[in-house]
Image (tube, coloured by chain):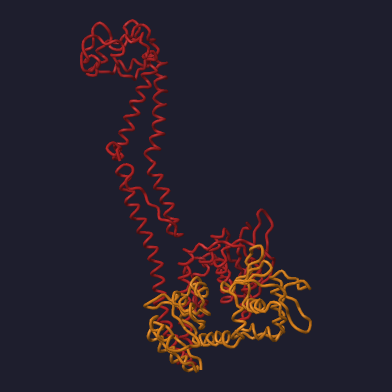
Chain colours: A red, B orange
């Protein structure tokens, strides 16, 4: 990159910005003070220069008022003595004030002359201020955009990274060859971090798959061995334990899969879905009913079925029955409400929210013989949120717990 | 005697299953690799195959496809992965059933019998007629994904009983089926059905197919004879 040498570090960029701003503001100030400067007739200064156009903050510029034939040194007042015949920057007869030239020399105490400025040239001072404010403001705006461009790229990349890690999109890569040194270093570190995160998530998935596979193989052996001991009561209990362990593996795997899978949404007949679920459970002897209005809604079918399954199985596990009902809430754009009622003891009001946290289960007496790891409601809420809906639990006044799922109609 | 080929890489599960299925009057040949499986398949014929998805020398899904290229042997896949995606893929590749590990040993026996009944006990015409995806009057009935889609692309879930019944009806479109025949053909291992439950399932199915049950409907009641699936079915 050819611009590397000057834009190498943030410090150099800042320096460049300040320097360019200073020069520009001087140039503008100068141009305002000497509107005639480009006209040849005024090259030698003279009475054409209006005293009001003098800008106090400008350094004395001799050359443009007619260079005295003393040599280039006299262009720069601080390098040599001022000419005697003429003040270095204004005509004596048109000067707004008659400061002795000694006072304007840098080696002299400048106090008196600066103190004198505001009194003598208020209009030009305001013009001067305005010009500087304009240039500085413009420079600050452009400069901040210029200096923060890498930060905006970083912000965008961080957002993309979040997507890439949680949804499996393409990993964002920052250009490590672009921008000042600090930015290139940041880009390098960011790219390494992104890759690390991505690898870790991928590994986590692979590891879970491997662990679940490796756990299930010995579980299968154990299950087969127990079969030869049946109908011993101890063996029966062990079979239940095997099933519990397997259910835990399954729900942990579920969390992994749900985080990653982006199932395509489809139009689904919700009533048919809950009826099919209820019919299958009835066939297996479970007290499940389904009723309500026919509603067609766009959902992720597998994910949504998992939500309903979790709610219905909770109701059966803790509440001995599940009654599913679908109703439509009028309004714009309207909502679908699915309730799953059970006939159990309900939950203490202060626990109604806690059960949505992962691995939270209520008192042991309730869950000991019923299995589960406490991920069902957590998964359900995650999935419902993904559908733009919400889910809550409430104790019904007539007894039993109600899980209420609200989804927007789209 | 059911001749069973077990392909499983875990030695102990092989031994345990051999003994267990032997107790149910099955003759089990157990092998540990895809290579040994190919040798065994050449040596003799089997009634059913139990295939583990993870083998040291090959992926179960590829092996499944490979066997399907040359044989109609019923395949039950056994897998420790057990996620719904691999289940669907497995069934799409021609496996007849799918069982996640650890399984209930008795369920494995029931599934073996069910698969055998489906392939051996039923007329050839039915196996041949079982197209994986059937279309009728705008509806799509995907038996692999167990999914019914309406003419306006809405997914309509079916219960297992409705699925089995529709499956039989689709296979016998244009034929009048008596209740007994429907009951016999749509029953599943473990579930008991009555005449009344057939009627109930038919009426639910009609409702889901938006069929009012009148003369022009999809599923017609033939008085005294049974039911008729009155439509053309395309693959």
Which residue is drawn at the image coordinates 33% and 31% (left, top)?
Answer: A18
Task: Using the image as rendered, state which of residue A349 and residue A198 is in the foreground.
Answer: A198
Residue A248 is left or right of residue B138, and the answer is: left
**Numbered circles on residues, count:** 0
Residue A350, percent across and down?
54, 65
Q: Going by the image, does B55 lie left or right of B118?
A: left
Quadrant containing the C terminus of chain A is bottom right
Closer to the camera in the image, A280 or B209: B209
Work out whether residue B67 can be spotted. yes
Q: Residue at x 58, y 64 (%)?
A: A392
Q: Along the horizontal axis of the image, is B135 left or right of B91?
A: right
Pinpoint residue A286: horizontal percent, then vertical percent: 61, 80
Quarter of the rendering containing residue B126: bottom right
Q: Is residue A248 visible?
A: no
Question: For this view, does A301 lie left or right of residue A27?
Answer: right
Q: Position of residue A231 (x, y in %)?
A: 49, 92
The quarter of the picture where residue A92 lies is: top left
Q: Quadrant of the N terminus of chain A?
A: top left
Relative to B36, residue A63 above or below: above
Residue drawn at x 69%, y 82% is B197
Indicate the position of residue A202 as horizontal and vertical percent values: 39, 64
């Amino acid at each position: 990159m050819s611009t590397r040498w000057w834009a190498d570090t943030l410090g150099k960029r800042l320096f460049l910005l300040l320097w360019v701003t200073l020069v520009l503001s001087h140039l503008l100030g100068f141009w305002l003070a000497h509107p005639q400067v480009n006209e040849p007739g005024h090259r030698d200064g003279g009475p054409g220069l209006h005293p009001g156009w003098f800008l106090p903050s400008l350094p004395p510029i001799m050359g443009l008022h007619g260079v005295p034939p003393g040599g280039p040194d006299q262009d720069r007042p601080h390098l040599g003595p001022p000419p005697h015949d003429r003040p270095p920057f204004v005509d004596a007869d048109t000067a707004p004030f008659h400061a002795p030239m000694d006072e304007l020399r840098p080696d002299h105490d400048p106090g008196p002359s600066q103190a004198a400025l505001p009194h003598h040239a208020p209009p030009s001072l305001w013009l001067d201020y305005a010009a500087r404010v304009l240039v500085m403001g413009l420079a600050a705006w452009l400069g901040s955009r210029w200096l923060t461009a890498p930060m905006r790229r970083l912000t965008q990349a961080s957002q993309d990274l979040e997507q890439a890690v949680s949804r499996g999109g393409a990993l964002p890569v920052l250009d490590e060859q672009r921008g000042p040194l600090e930015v290139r270093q940041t880009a390098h570190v960011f790219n390494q971090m992104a890759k690390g995160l991505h690898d870790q998530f991928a590994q986590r998935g692979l590891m879970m798959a491997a662990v679940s596979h490796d756990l299930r193989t010995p579980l299968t052996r154990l299950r087969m061995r127990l079969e030869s001991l049946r109908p011993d009561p101890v063996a029966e209990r062990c079979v239940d334990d095997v099933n519990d362990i397997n259910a835990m593996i399954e729900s942990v795997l579920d969390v992994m899969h749900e985080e990653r899978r982006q199932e395509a949404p489809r139009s689904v007949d919700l009533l048919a879905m809950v009826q099919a679920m209820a019919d299958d459970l009835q066939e297996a002897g479970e007290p499940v009913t389904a009723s309500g209005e026919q509603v067609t809604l766009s959902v992720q079918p597998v994910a949504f079925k998992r939500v309903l399954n979790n709610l219905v199985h909770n109701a059966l596990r803790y509440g001995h029955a599940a009654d599913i009902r679908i109703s439509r809430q009028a309004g714009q754009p309207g909502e679908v409400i699915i309730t799953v009622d059970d006939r159990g003891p309900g939950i203490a009001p202060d626990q109604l929210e806690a059960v949505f946290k992962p691995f939270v289960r209520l008192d042991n007496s309730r869950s000991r013989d019923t299995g589960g790891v406490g991920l069902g409601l957590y998964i359900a809420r995650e999935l419902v949120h993904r559908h733009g809906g919400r889910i809550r639990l409430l104790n019904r006044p007539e007894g039993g717990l109600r899980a209420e799922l609200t989804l927007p109609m789209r | 005697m059911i001749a069973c080929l077990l392909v499983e890489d875990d030695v102990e599960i092989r031994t345990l299953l051999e003994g267990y299925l032997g107790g149910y009057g099955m003759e089990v040949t157990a092998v540990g690799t895809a290579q040994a499986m190919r040798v065994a398949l050449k040596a003799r014929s089997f009634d059913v195959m139990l295939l583990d998805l993870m083998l040291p020398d090959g992926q179960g899904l590829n092996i499944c496809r490979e066997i399907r290229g040359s044989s109609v042997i019923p395949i039950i896949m056994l897998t420790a992965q057990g996620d719904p995606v691999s289940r669907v893929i497995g069934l799409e590749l021609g496996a007849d059933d799918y069982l996640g590990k650890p399984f209930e040993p008795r369920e494995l026996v029931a599934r073996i019998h069910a698969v055998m009944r489906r392939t051996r006990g039923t007329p050839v015409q039915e196996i041949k007629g079982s197209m994986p995806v059937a279309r009728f009057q705008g509806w799509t009935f995907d038996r692999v994904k167990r999914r019914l889609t309406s003419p306006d692309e809405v997914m309509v879930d079916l219960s297992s009983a409705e699925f089995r019944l529709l499956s039989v009806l689709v296979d016998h479109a244009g034929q009048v089926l008596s209740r007994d025949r429907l009951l016999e053909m749509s029953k599943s291992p473990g579930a008991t059905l009555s005449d009344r439950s057939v009627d109930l399932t038919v009426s639910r199915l009609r409702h889901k197919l938006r069929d009012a049950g009148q003369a022009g409907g999809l599923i017609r009641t033939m008085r005294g004879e049974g039911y008729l699936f009155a439509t053309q079915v395309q693959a």
